[in-house]
Amino acid sequence: MPKPKVYVTRIIPEPGLSMLRECCEIELHESKEYPPSREELIKKIRDKDALLCLLTDKIDAEVMDAAPNLKVISTYSVGFDHIDIPEATKRGIYVTHTPGVLTDAVAEFTVGLILAVTRRIVEADKIIRSGQWDKPWNPYFLTGPELKGKTIGLIGLGRIGVATAKRLSSFEVKILYYDLERRWDVETVLPNMQFADIDTVLSESDIVSIHVPLTKDTYHLINEEKLKKMKKTAYLINTARGPVVDTEALVKALREGWIAGAALDVFEQEPLPPTHPLTKFDNVVLAPHIASATIEARQRMAELAARNLIAVLKGEMPPALVNK
Ligand code: DGY
Protein backbone atom coordinates (compact mmCIF):
# COMPACT_ATOMS: atom_id res chain seq x y z
CA MET A 1 0.00 0.00 0.00
CA PRO A 2 1.54 3.37 -0.93
CA LYS A 3 1.78 5.85 1.91
CA PRO A 4 -0.62 8.83 1.84
CA LYS A 5 0.91 12.03 0.52
CA VAL A 6 1.05 15.09 2.75
CA TYR A 7 2.13 18.66 2.03
CA VAL A 8 3.50 20.50 5.06
CA THR A 9 3.81 24.25 4.55
CA ARG A 10 6.52 24.91 7.16
CA ILE A 11 9.09 23.10 9.28
CA ILE A 12 6.96 22.57 12.38
CA PRO A 13 8.50 21.60 15.76
CA GLU A 14 9.05 18.03 16.81
CA PRO A 15 7.44 15.63 17.46
CA GLY A 16 5.07 16.72 14.68
CA LEU A 17 7.28 16.04 11.69
CA SER A 18 8.53 12.66 12.95
CA MET A 19 4.98 11.52 13.59
CA LEU A 20 4.02 12.43 10.04
CA ARG A 21 7.12 10.81 8.55
CA GLU A 22 6.26 7.49 10.20
CA CYS A 23 2.99 7.09 8.36
CA CYS A 24 3.08 9.37 5.34
CA GLU A 25 5.13 10.48 2.42
CA ILE A 26 5.69 14.11 3.27
CA GLU A 27 6.68 16.96 1.04
CA LEU A 28 7.94 19.78 3.20
CA HIS A 29 8.21 23.46 2.41
CA GLU A 30 11.74 23.72 3.80
CA SER A 31 11.42 26.93 5.76
CA LYS A 32 10.90 27.75 9.41
CA GLU A 33 9.96 31.34 8.65
CA TYR A 34 8.29 31.82 5.31
CA PRO A 35 5.17 30.25 3.83
CA PRO A 36 5.13 28.87 0.31
CA SER A 37 3.89 31.29 -2.33
CA ARG A 38 0.31 30.76 -3.41
CA GLU A 39 1.50 29.37 -6.77
CA GLU A 40 3.75 26.90 -5.00
CA LEU A 41 1.01 25.85 -2.58
CA ILE A 42 -1.40 25.22 -5.45
CA LYS A 43 1.24 23.30 -7.41
CA LYS A 44 2.40 21.16 -4.50
CA ILE A 45 -1.05 20.24 -3.24
CA ARG A 46 -2.26 18.70 -6.54
CA ASP A 47 -1.48 15.06 -5.74
CA LYS A 48 -1.75 15.28 -1.94
CA ASP A 49 -4.14 13.46 0.40
CA ALA A 50 -3.54 15.85 3.27
CA LEU A 51 -2.36 19.35 4.02
CA LEU A 52 -0.72 20.61 7.19
CA CYS A 53 -0.84 24.39 7.04
CA LEU A 54 -0.30 27.46 9.21
CA LEU A 55 -2.46 30.50 9.83
CA THR A 56 -0.50 32.39 7.17
CA ASP A 57 -1.71 30.05 4.40
CA LYS A 58 -5.01 31.08 2.86
CA ILE A 59 -6.88 27.90 2.05
CA ASP A 60 -9.86 28.69 -0.13
CA ALA A 61 -11.89 27.09 -2.93
CA GLU A 62 -9.12 27.65 -5.48
CA VAL A 63 -6.62 25.70 -3.37
CA MET A 64 -9.13 22.92 -2.68
CA ASP A 65 -10.08 22.69 -6.38
CA ALA A 66 -6.42 22.10 -7.16
CA ALA A 67 -6.36 19.08 -4.84
CA PRO A 68 -8.94 16.48 -5.89
CA ASN A 69 -7.57 13.86 -3.45
CA LEU A 70 -7.50 16.13 -0.40
CA LYS A 71 -9.12 14.52 2.65
CA VAL A 72 -7.89 16.68 5.49
CA ILE A 73 -6.63 20.19 6.17
CA SER A 74 -4.89 20.24 9.51
CA THR A 75 -3.98 23.70 10.68
CA TYR A 76 -1.18 24.32 13.16
CA SER A 77 -3.29 26.92 15.00
CA VAL A 78 -6.41 27.19 17.08
CA GLY A 79 -7.82 29.88 14.78
CA PHE A 80 -9.14 28.72 11.42
CA ASP A 81 -10.29 31.98 9.84
CA HIS A 82 -7.71 31.44 7.07
CA ILE A 83 -9.60 28.36 5.86
CA ASP A 84 -12.90 28.46 3.97
CA ILE A 85 -14.77 25.96 6.15
CA PRO A 86 -18.03 25.78 4.13
CA GLU A 87 -16.01 25.07 0.96
CA ALA A 88 -14.09 22.29 2.72
CA THR A 89 -17.27 20.80 4.17
CA LYS A 90 -18.97 20.89 0.77
CA ARG A 91 -16.10 18.80 -0.61
CA GLY A 92 -16.09 16.37 2.33
CA ILE A 93 -12.66 17.62 3.47
CA TYR A 94 -12.06 17.42 7.22
CA VAL A 95 -10.66 20.58 8.81
CA THR A 96 -8.85 20.23 12.13
CA HIS A 97 -7.13 22.69 14.49
CA THR A 98 -5.16 22.82 17.75
CA PRO A 99 -7.39 24.01 20.60
CA GLY A 100 -6.52 23.56 24.27
CA VAL A 101 -2.77 23.07 23.89
CA LEU A 102 -1.96 26.78 23.65
CA THR A 103 -4.59 28.07 26.07
CA ASP A 104 -2.22 28.50 29.03
CA ALA A 105 0.45 30.17 26.90
CA VAL A 106 -2.00 32.74 25.53
CA ALA A 107 -3.60 33.39 28.93
CA GLU A 108 -0.16 33.93 30.53
CA PHE A 109 0.79 36.32 27.74
CA THR A 110 -2.47 38.24 28.09
CA VAL A 111 -1.71 38.86 31.76
CA GLY A 112 1.79 39.94 30.72
CA LEU A 113 0.40 42.46 28.23
CA ILE A 114 -2.02 43.86 30.80
CA LEU A 115 0.80 44.43 33.28
CA ALA A 116 3.15 45.74 30.58
CA VAL A 117 0.75 48.43 29.41
CA THR A 118 -0.78 49.47 32.74
CA ARG A 119 2.53 49.48 34.65
CA ARG A 120 4.34 50.99 31.66
CA ILE A 121 7.08 48.37 31.60
CA VAL A 122 8.04 48.79 27.94
CA GLU A 123 8.00 52.57 28.24
CA ALA A 124 10.24 52.31 31.33
CA ASP A 125 12.74 50.10 29.53
CA LYS A 126 12.88 52.53 26.59
CA ILE A 127 13.46 55.48 28.95
CA ILE A 128 16.53 53.87 30.48
CA ARG A 129 18.00 52.70 27.18
CA SER A 130 17.57 56.12 25.58
CA GLY A 131 19.31 57.89 28.46
CA GLN A 132 16.17 59.62 29.71
CA TRP A 133 16.39 58.36 33.31
CA ASP A 134 17.90 61.63 34.34
CA LYS A 135 16.07 62.46 37.60
CA PRO A 136 16.25 60.84 41.06
CA TRP A 137 13.38 58.70 42.36
CA ASN A 138 10.16 60.65 42.67
CA PRO A 139 6.55 59.75 43.48
CA TYR A 140 5.14 60.58 40.06
CA PHE A 141 7.51 58.89 37.66
CA LEU A 142 5.86 56.26 35.38
CA THR A 143 2.85 55.64 37.58
CA GLY A 144 -0.04 53.52 36.36
CA PRO A 145 -3.19 51.93 37.74
CA GLU A 146 -3.09 49.02 40.19
CA LEU A 147 -5.07 45.95 39.14
CA LYS A 148 -6.51 45.12 42.56
CA GLY A 149 -10.10 46.26 42.84
CA LYS A 150 -10.44 47.06 39.14
CA THR A 151 -12.97 45.65 36.68
CA ILE A 152 -11.67 43.54 33.83
CA GLY A 153 -13.90 43.01 30.81
CA LEU A 154 -13.56 39.87 28.74
CA ILE A 155 -15.08 39.84 25.27
CA GLY A 156 -15.47 36.11 24.67
CA LEU A 157 -15.30 33.41 27.31
CA GLY A 158 -14.03 30.33 25.51
CA ARG A 159 -11.05 28.28 26.67
CA ILE A 160 -8.59 31.19 26.53
CA GLY A 161 -11.04 33.65 28.10
CA VAL A 162 -11.62 31.28 31.02
CA ALA A 163 -7.89 30.61 31.51
CA THR A 164 -7.26 34.36 31.49
CA ALA A 165 -10.08 34.94 34.00
CA LYS A 166 -8.60 32.32 36.34
CA ARG A 167 -5.20 33.97 36.30
CA LEU A 168 -6.55 37.50 36.65
CA SER A 169 -8.77 36.50 39.57
CA SER A 170 -5.68 36.18 41.76
CA PHE A 171 -5.26 39.97 41.36
CA GLU A 172 -8.56 40.41 43.26
CA VAL A 173 -10.44 41.99 40.40
CA LYS A 174 -14.06 41.91 39.34
CA ILE A 175 -14.54 40.32 35.93
CA LEU A 176 -17.36 41.22 33.56
CA TYR A 177 -17.70 38.98 30.54
CA TYR A 178 -19.65 38.97 27.35
CA ASP A 179 -20.27 35.86 25.27
CA LEU A 180 -23.10 34.40 23.28
CA GLU A 181 -23.97 32.18 26.24
CA ARG A 182 -23.83 32.66 29.97
CA ARG A 183 -21.18 30.40 31.53
CA TRP A 184 -22.74 29.25 34.80
CA ASP A 185 -20.04 26.58 35.13
CA VAL A 186 -17.32 29.25 35.21
CA GLU A 187 -19.29 31.60 37.48
CA THR A 188 -19.63 28.78 40.01
CA VAL A 189 -15.85 28.40 40.22
CA LEU A 190 -15.06 32.12 39.95
CA PRO A 191 -17.61 34.11 41.95
CA ASN A 192 -15.95 37.40 40.94
CA MET A 193 -17.32 36.91 37.42
CA GLN A 194 -20.45 38.51 36.08
CA PHE A 195 -22.18 38.07 32.73
CA ALA A 196 -23.12 41.30 30.91
CA ASP A 197 -24.00 42.62 27.48
CA ILE A 198 -21.10 43.89 25.36
CA ASP A 199 -21.86 47.57 25.91
CA THR A 200 -21.89 47.15 29.69
CA VAL A 201 -18.58 45.26 29.54
CA LEU A 202 -17.07 48.06 27.48
CA SER A 203 -18.41 50.95 29.51
CA GLU A 204 -17.72 49.54 32.99
CA SER A 205 -14.32 47.90 32.55
CA ASP A 206 -10.91 49.33 33.32
CA ILE A 207 -9.30 46.79 31.02
CA VAL A 208 -11.03 45.12 28.09
CA SER A 209 -9.44 41.94 26.73
CA ILE A 210 -10.62 40.29 23.51
CA HIS A 211 -10.95 36.50 23.29
CA VAL A 212 -13.30 35.81 20.38
CA PRO A 213 -12.47 34.00 17.15
CA LEU A 214 -12.52 35.97 13.90
CA THR A 215 -15.78 35.33 12.05
CA LYS A 216 -18.01 37.48 9.87
CA ASP A 217 -19.86 38.45 13.08
CA THR A 218 -16.74 39.50 14.99
CA TYR A 219 -15.01 41.35 12.14
CA HIS A 220 -14.53 44.94 13.40
CA LEU A 221 -16.63 44.11 16.45
CA ILE A 222 -14.59 46.74 18.27
CA ASN A 223 -15.26 49.73 16.06
CA GLU A 224 -15.52 53.47 16.63
CA GLU A 225 -18.90 53.21 18.33
CA LYS A 226 -17.68 50.51 20.72
CA LEU A 227 -14.39 52.28 21.50
CA LYS A 228 -16.34 55.41 22.39
CA LYS A 229 -18.20 53.40 25.04
CA MET A 230 -14.97 52.60 26.90
CA LYS A 231 -13.75 54.66 29.84
CA LYS A 232 -11.11 57.28 29.07
CA THR A 233 -8.94 55.53 31.67
CA ALA A 234 -9.41 52.04 30.18
CA TYR A 235 -7.00 49.84 28.20
CA LEU A 236 -7.75 47.54 25.27
CA ILE A 237 -5.91 44.20 24.98
CA ASN A 238 -6.06 42.02 21.86
CA THR A 239 -4.49 38.56 21.66
CA ALA A 240 -7.28 37.11 19.49
CA ARG A 241 -7.25 38.26 15.86
CA GLY A 242 -6.36 41.68 14.44
CA PRO A 243 -9.49 42.22 12.33
CA VAL A 244 -11.74 41.96 15.41
CA VAL A 245 -10.63 45.55 16.05
CA ASP A 246 -11.06 48.32 13.47
CA THR A 247 -7.46 49.59 13.43
CA GLU A 248 -8.32 52.98 12.01
CA ALA A 249 -10.87 53.53 14.77
CA LEU A 250 -8.36 52.39 17.39
CA VAL A 251 -5.72 54.83 16.12
CA LYS A 252 -8.33 57.59 16.29
CA ALA A 253 -9.30 56.53 19.83
CA LEU A 254 -5.66 56.67 20.96
CA ARG A 255 -4.98 59.95 19.21
CA GLU A 256 -8.05 61.63 20.65
CA GLY A 257 -7.71 60.08 24.12
CA TRP A 258 -10.96 58.06 24.18
CA ILE A 259 -8.98 55.31 25.97
CA ALA A 260 -5.81 55.23 28.08
CA GLY A 261 -3.84 52.73 26.02
CA ALA A 262 -3.70 49.36 24.30
CA ALA A 263 -1.63 46.20 24.20
CA LEU A 264 -1.83 44.28 20.95
CA ASP A 265 -0.40 40.96 19.81
CA VAL A 266 -2.43 40.71 16.60
CA PHE A 267 -3.09 43.13 13.76
CA GLU A 268 -5.13 43.57 10.63
CA GLN A 269 -1.83 43.78 8.78
CA GLU A 270 0.85 41.27 9.81
CA PRO A 271 3.77 41.87 9.95
CA LEU A 272 2.94 45.38 11.18
CA PRO A 273 5.28 47.85 9.43
CA PRO A 274 7.46 49.97 11.75
CA THR A 275 5.97 53.10 10.17
CA HIS A 276 2.42 52.16 11.19
CA PRO A 277 0.58 54.83 13.26
CA LEU A 278 0.21 52.35 16.15
CA THR A 279 3.99 52.40 16.64
CA LYS A 280 3.89 56.11 17.46
CA PHE A 281 2.10 55.82 20.82
CA ASP A 282 4.01 55.38 24.10
CA ASN A 283 0.83 54.06 25.71
CA VAL A 284 0.62 51.13 23.28
CA VAL A 285 2.50 47.87 23.77
CA LEU A 286 3.02 45.88 20.57
CA ALA A 287 3.95 42.22 20.14
CA PRO A 288 4.41 40.31 16.87
CA HIS A 289 1.67 37.62 17.24
CA ILE A 290 3.55 35.61 19.87
CA ALA A 291 0.92 34.95 22.55
CA SER A 292 1.18 31.18 22.02
CA ALA A 293 4.96 31.25 21.67
CA THR A 294 6.04 29.05 24.54
CA ILE A 295 8.32 26.20 23.57
CA GLU A 296 5.87 23.77 25.17
CA ALA A 297 2.78 25.11 23.41
CA ARG A 298 4.46 25.12 20.01
CA GLN A 299 5.51 21.47 20.45
CA ARG A 300 2.03 20.44 21.62
CA MET A 301 0.49 22.25 18.64
CA ALA A 302 2.74 20.26 16.30
CA GLU A 303 1.84 17.00 17.98
CA LEU A 304 -1.90 17.71 17.90
CA ALA A 305 -1.80 18.92 14.28
CA ALA A 306 -0.04 15.67 13.31
CA ARG A 307 -2.44 13.50 15.36
CA ASN A 308 -5.43 15.21 13.74
CA LEU A 309 -4.10 14.64 10.24
CA ILE A 310 -3.07 11.02 10.83
CA ALA A 311 -6.43 10.15 12.43
CA VAL A 312 -8.36 11.32 9.36
CA LEU A 313 -6.07 9.41 7.00
CA LYS A 314 -6.64 6.28 9.10
CA GLY A 315 -10.40 6.77 8.88
CA GLU A 316 -10.65 7.68 12.56
CA MET A 317 -12.28 10.68 14.22
CA PRO A 318 -9.58 13.35 14.72
CA PRO A 319 -9.15 14.77 18.24
CA ALA A 320 -9.98 18.35 17.17
CA LEU A 321 -12.34 18.55 14.22
CA VAL A 322 -13.69 21.94 13.12
CA ASN A 323 -16.37 20.97 10.59
CA LYS A 324 -18.37 18.40 12.61
C1 DGY B 1 -3.57 30.45 16.78
O1 DGY B 1 -3.19 29.30 17.06
O2 DGY B 1 -4.61 30.66 16.17
C2 DGY B 1 -2.70 31.59 17.25
O3 DGY B 1 -3.05 32.78 16.73
C3 DGY B 1 -1.24 31.30 17.02
O4 DGY B 1 -0.87 30.28 17.87
Image: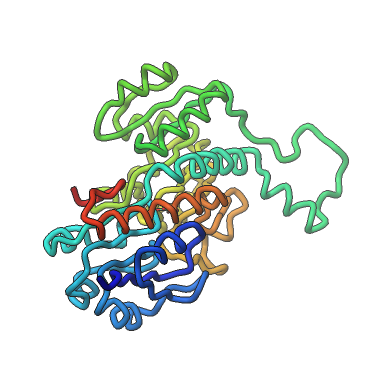
Q: Residue at x 48, y 73 (%)?
A: 34
User: Which picture quadrant has residue 176?
Assistant: top left
Establish if 122 lies above or below 274: above
Q: Nearer the viewer, residue 70 or 279?
A: 70
- Percent position (x, y) of residue 165? 46, 30
Q: Residue at x 33, y 48 (%)?
A: 213
Q: Is residue 114 visible?
A: yes
Query: How many marks overall?
Result: 0
User: Which color scheme is applied?
Assistant: rainbow
- Percent position (x, y) of residue 154? 40, 34
- Percent position (x, y) of residue 178? 32, 32
Q: Residue at x 36, y 20 (%)?
A: 187
Q: Residue at x 49, y 38 (%)?
A: 232
Q: Residue furthest left?
A: 90
User: Which picture quadrant has residue 204?
Assistant: top left
Establish if 237 lies above or below 33: above
Q: Nearer the viewer, residue 81 or 77?
A: 77
Q: Nearer the viewer, residue 271 or 73?
A: 73
Q: Is residue 150 left or right of residue 188?
A: right
Q: Is residue 158 left or right of residue 118?
A: left
Q: Is residue 237 left or right of residue 87?
A: right
Q: Is residue 264 visible?
A: no
Q: Is residue 100 left or right of residue 108?
A: left
- Percent position (x, y) of residue 131? 83, 56
* Location of the N terminus (image quadrant): bottom left
Q: Nearer the viewer, residue 269 or 199?
A: 269
